[in-house]
Amino acid sequence: MLTVAQLAPLKDRDPYLYETLTRIVTAVNATSQRVGVDPATPSPAPIPIASIKVQASNGWFDIAITDPSDARPGLFYFAESDTTPAFNAPRVYFLGASRNLYVQLGNQTLYWRGFSQYIGSQASTPVNFGAPPTAVAGGGASGPAPQPSTGSGTLTNGLTRGGNGFGTNPGSRITRQSNL
């Protein structure tokens, strides 16, 4: 959050300037909090989703995330699939603001999990389908073998990891030049 240490001496010297600058700082901080772009510290992760449900038939996987949380605008959802319950190389599906995914993946047996994230926050703790994680068979015709996962988001040194959402590298934000 934006703090301006030099405001205190202005309070007595120029109360109008002090009030104006205080309002600007308050507005900037409120906007930063609303959109989750505090450059000093990442926003905390949203609470985990309530559940993820998966069904499949004829190679089609139907995924539904349930999240009754009282979220602020800008919450995005992710689903991940993997051939093992450890999710060592998950395939990441960005759902955006939607909590549903309907995708043709062929005759594969996959484990699924889901999570949410704001831009500028940590990802929530992933929630698996089933406890313990339960595999879902796609059935039907088989498509091509999937390519290796390349994860999601930004990580240093080209690391690949699931459960990462937009990423956690604080240097990954795009900065925009402005002439004020």
Image (cartoon, rainbow, N blue to C red):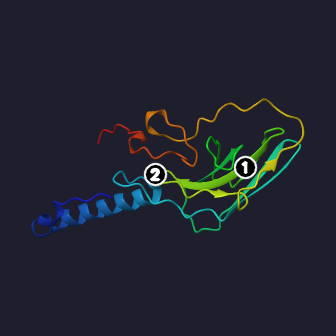
Residue at figure coordinates x 33%, y 58% from the top left: 1
Q: Which residue is mark 1?
A: 111
Task: Give left or right: position of 9 versus 88.
Answer: left
Question: Which of the two residues, 71 or 113, is positioned nearer the viewer here?
Answer: 113
Which residue: 29% across, 57% down?
2
The amino acid type of the residue labelled 2 equals Gly
Q: Which residue is mark 2?
A: 120
Q: Amino acid at mark 1?
A: Tyr
Pick the front one: 103 or 125:
125
- The 10 Å Cα crowd at callout 1, few under 14, some 14 to 19, many 20 or more, is many
Task: Judge whether 13 appears above or below 64 on screen.
Answer: below
| Residue 10 located left or right of residue 111 | left
Report x, y in % for residue 175: 38, 39
Count every numbered label the image shows and give the total: 2
Asked if residue 107 shows in the view, the reply is yes
Residue at the (49%, 45%) spot, across then down: 167
Q: Label 2, secondary structure: give it.
A: loop
Which quadrant: the C terminus?
Answer: top left
Picture disc at residue 102: none
Mark 2 burial class by Cα count in 10 Å: few <14, some 14-19, many 20+: many
